[in-house]
Image (cartoon, coloured by chain):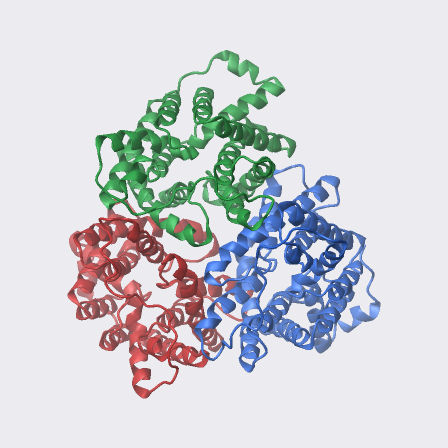
Chain colours: A blue, B red, C green
Amino acid sequence: MPVAEPDAVRRLESRQPIAYLLASVRGVGQVDLQPGIWTGAFILAGLWAAGWQIGLFATLGTLISTATAYVLGVDRSGIALGLHGYSGCLTGIALVVSLGHHPATYVLAVVGSVMCTLLMAALTTLLAPYGLTALTAPFCLVSGVMVVGAPSFGRIWHGAPKAVSSTTRGGTGISWNDLWHGFFTNVSQIFLVGDWYVGLIMLVGLAFAGVRVVLHAAAGSVVGIVAAWALGAPTALIAEGIYGYNAVLVAIAVGAVYLTGTVWNGAYALFGAAVTTGLTASLTSFFEPFGGHTFTWPFILTTWVFMAAVPLLPRFRRSG
Amino acid sequence: MPVAEPDAVRRLESRQPIAYLLASVRGVGQVDLQPGIWTGAFILAGLWAAGWQIGLFATLGTLISTATAYVLGVDRSGIALGLHGYSGCLTGIALVVSLGHHPATYVLAVVGSVMCTLLMAALTTLLAPYGLTALTAPFCLVSGVMVVGAPSFGRIWHGAPKAVSSTTRGGTGISWNDLWHGFFTNVSQIFLVGDWYVGLIMLVGLAFAGVRVVLHAAAGSVVGIVAAWALGAPTALIAEGIYGYNAVLVAIAVGAVYLTGTVWNGAYALFGAAVTTGLTASLTSFFEPFGGHTFTWPFILTTWVFMAAVPLLPRFRRSG
Amino acid sequence: MPVAEPDAVRRLESRQPIAYLLASVRGVGQVDLQPGIWTGAFILAGLWAAGWQIGLFATLGTLISTATAYVLGVDRSGIALGLHGYSGCLTGIALVVSLGHHPATYVLAVVGSVMCTLLMAALTTLLAPYGLTALTAPFCLVSGVMVVGAPSFGRIWHGAPKAVSSTTRGGTGISWNDLWHGFFTNVSQIFLVGDWYVGLIMLVGLAFAGVRVVLHAAAGSVVGIVAAWALGAPTALIAEGIYGYNAVLVAIAVGAVYLTGTVWNGAYALFGAAVTTGLTASLTSFFEPFGGHTFTWPFILTTWVFMAAVPLLPRFRRSG
């Protein structure tokens, strides 16, 4: 059960500029599919702890895409839950990480955040007949298109600021140090951050969303590590969280959000977490020739497949 | 308001072979989403002015795909509007431009034009639930598949006749000469033609479709140039129209065809024109490793996203 | 008309463990879209004749994915027809052929077969609104993902055991020997097997499914050879069945399963068989840069397009 929010929060929400800020904080938490204000606040704190550029671009992206939803007249209840902020949050981070801190990156972050809100609306239209949601696909599409296109443009491209994660080959021996690092970086790497303490701060935030959420996040992280190790992934990538962040998201989404809390559903969610770990390598190989980025595509595709299958599999049951 | 067609045209349409020819002329205009007979006639004249091979293959493609629709019993009202001719028109041009003028190219143009009509029907089935239309996707799919597959076949492939457009790096300084060339080639490049006077003839044709259509086409062309310049695209490609033809199509489709004539809708269409200009580079990079071609994919994807978003964005309103 | 099955088979189906085995045998036949028990038995015999590893992995894959459907509570009537076994059958074969006979391949075959059942359910949900079925797409997705991802994992990858088919250039002269080899390998290559006698055994099995099925299979094989030769494909690939297996499947699916037995429908199916032959080269070029595999994608995409077009083309009529 999520931690109750103080009545003060509820009352503040009726005042326009405050409602906008609260919706934005919730938007940061919605990256992990959690609308709680405390979860969003802790995650946002973690992002600023990862560096001021990441914190700034995450904040800007969330604020702009949420504001775009207001301006375009999107249904208010969805905005209030933060549903139009999370893709902008991730897009801001992805752009400053991939393109570096330049004036042009600010312009792209603004355009990208606006596009996130448009893609959120478009994907909602396209997925509604199947009972699926857009998840982080607006972010992956917008950031992917921009990262792939950037090197063609002289005023955007200043060279890659740092090598973005890729599936390289390497040693597969694993130490205790690798394991606990990987456990936390799996949580922070959802936001393209590889620092274990950021993952720890975010897990505390997820604990405010309830025991079930944080347990699924932790279990997903463990499954991601075990699956990657069993397949023989390079240890360095496991320790950086590259192989496990999608597993965390799948475990939360399938196990703690979309399905009810049965044993079968839990097993299904963790099986999905293992599958998405393997899928991470395949998609990285797919994106490599044209310079695309894996981002959270493994999570999105796995969750869509697993949830689209549920109506024909009576063993599993949707919540809500 | 489009220029009224003489009553004579209406009367001719009741006679079978004439109806077929009129539907084909309208089909040429439907590449720019315009069913008017004058628009189609001017654009067709522009294509023959670009060279007899381009004119011939455009004509053949349109005639064959329109005839296929008749033979397979497709609804007559759609055929009369030219909806089953425009993808064949573009496919004919794309094949002779990409594969050269050989006997085998005629055979492929026939098969490709038939496939365009099948794909038009298939995509209409798949997109109908979302209120979207196929746009030029049948052309992009058929021509893309043929261009990618051709080098594998000894009787089809005679080497690339000329380098097809690609996003190369180059100088970004721009002159008045580049600007007005780009303004017109943005219109002709929709048909894979890089001659400014062809674009001028086509713009005259679009003027017959009404002030609103030609103004959106012109504005889209300007936005395409400005966006490409601001991003830092190579000037040579801007002047050839490589970066702007999708912007022209998006501006016409979103601004003058699918949405009503409000200020918000116009701004939305021109924002789409800017977005599709950037998307052009990303898709070109995506297609490069396997030898695919960008064609009008940026226009198609941008228009699908922008139109699929409209039902959830009350700020914008569909026409009709 | 298919050969009648003995009453004994019907009676056996009421007993649980036997029903499971019968459903699995039918599952092998469903790769060729045929639920008949004799067809499945002959094809299974052909697979064991191709080698014990292929026979074993095909059997394991079918048994596991069928069992998964039982365990997850999938509708029994579909399971009895073998609809949840065929993708597992092909996945088992594809994995042992692509990754070699290692302990890890057994583990992947189990996971892959389970995933086939999940993807079958997911695709059924997604395709139902259009009246389309999943065909062999679960197999292509699962096996494709695993083959692309495998080289990234130290405990999975032992180097490619043999070069998987690719569109290479080569001589285009054709002999009688090439022709009859190709005729049979087109049938066996559906199962990634290049031995002509395996194709012969499978054709005998298809004859038990009725004259119409085996005639369409044979005609599809001939069209595949003629189309590949006319395009100028390398003779060696035609003789190995690389260019014709999709044509066989399209001819059976469109001509003998989904549409009624009219002349127009037959011509449509054989036109589809020719089209899918050309598409094979394009998709192989598409998959090459990232190490993907063509598998039966040409069949799937061609059949989806041709069947999605039918509702708007009154010339053709669906069966059932």
In the picture shown, does residue C271 fall above or below B300? above
In the picture shown, does residue A279 fall above or below C136? below
In the picture shown, does residue A277 fall above or below C259? below
- Please name the residue shown 60% across and 67% down the image: A74
The residue closer to the viewer here, A297 or A189, is A189
Left or right: residue B249 versus residue A194 is left
- Asked where in the image residue A297 lies, by quadrant, the reply is bottom right
- Please name the residue shown 44% across and 40% down the image: C162
Q: Quadrant of the N terminus of chain B?
A: bottom left
The residue closer to the viewer here, C7 or B20, is C7
Left or right: residue A92 versus residue B238 is right
- Please name the residue shown 57% across and 52% down the image: A281
- Asked where in the image residue A59 lies, by quadrant, the reply is bottom right
Task: Give the percent coordinates (x, y) of residue A288.
Answer: 50, 59
Task: Give the percent coordinates (x, y) of residue A146.
Answer: 51, 69
Res C256 seen here: no
Q: Quadrant of the C terminus of chain B?
A: bottom left
Q: Residue furthest bottom?
A: B176
Res B61 seen here: yes
The residue closer to the viewer here, B296 or A105, is A105
Left or right: residue C282 versus residue C229 is right
- Asked where in the image residue C319 lies, by quadrant, the reply is top left
